[in-house]
Image (spheres, rainbow, N blue to C red):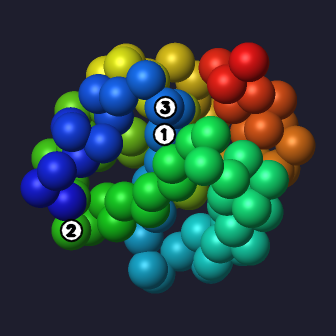
Amino acid sequence: MNNFESYIQGTIPVVVEFYADWSESCKLMEPILQEVKEIAGERAITVRIDVDKNHEIAEQYQIYTVPSVAIFKEGYMIWHKNGITAAHEILDHLLLEIE
């Protein structure tokens, strides 16, 4: 993703799922991320980053496990968790940034 840095520079929080196509756990995150997207609406951006195609981004942010979810705001990673993460947990951290 060539414009990843421009996505995360804004004041709107960006929820990023780092995933790989071969990971069964990552497939379980798809509906969770969709739920986050539906609830957050235009107050946040959601992005999926394939670590196999974007290994430079994964290395830059020290993502070594998939799935991993991170929230970025104004260019900084403000929250990160490895593994399958419930929508309510992502939203709890996201809503702190929206309010």
Gap between marks 2 and 3 measured at Cα: 25 Å
Q: CA distance from mark 2 to mark 1?
A: 20 Å
Label 2 element class = loop
- Per the model, the C-alpha gap separating discs 1 and 3 is 6 Å
Quadrant showing the C terminus: top right
Q: Residues within 10 Å of mark 3 (few under 14, many from 20)?
A: some
Give, as a three-letter code, the residue at label 1.
Val
Please give the label number shown on residue 12: 3
Residue 81 percent across, percent down from the top left? 62, 35
| Residue found 26% across the figure and 67% down from its top | 52
Q: How dense is the environment of label 2, judged by Cα within 10 Å: few (below 14), some, or many (20 and up)?
A: few
The reply to whether the C-beta atoms of the residues labelled 2 and 1 are less than 8 Å apart is no
SS under mark 1? strand
Judge whether 60 appears above or below 28 on screen: above
- Looking at the image, is mark 2 or mark 1 earlier in the sequence? 1
The residue drawn where x is 39% and y is 40% is 63
Q: Are the two marked residues, 1 and 3, in contact with CB atoms closer than 8 angstroms?
A: yes
Name which residue lies at 52% across and 32% down: 13
- Please state the horizontal and vertical placement of residue 12, each as a whole percent of the image: 48, 31
Residue 93 visible from this viewpoint: no
- Residue 14's disc is 1
| Position of 97 relative to 50 (above/below) | above
Residue under numbered circle 2: 53
Q: Considering only vertical position in the picture, is 10 above or below 69?
A: above
Q: Label 3 amino acid?
A: Ile
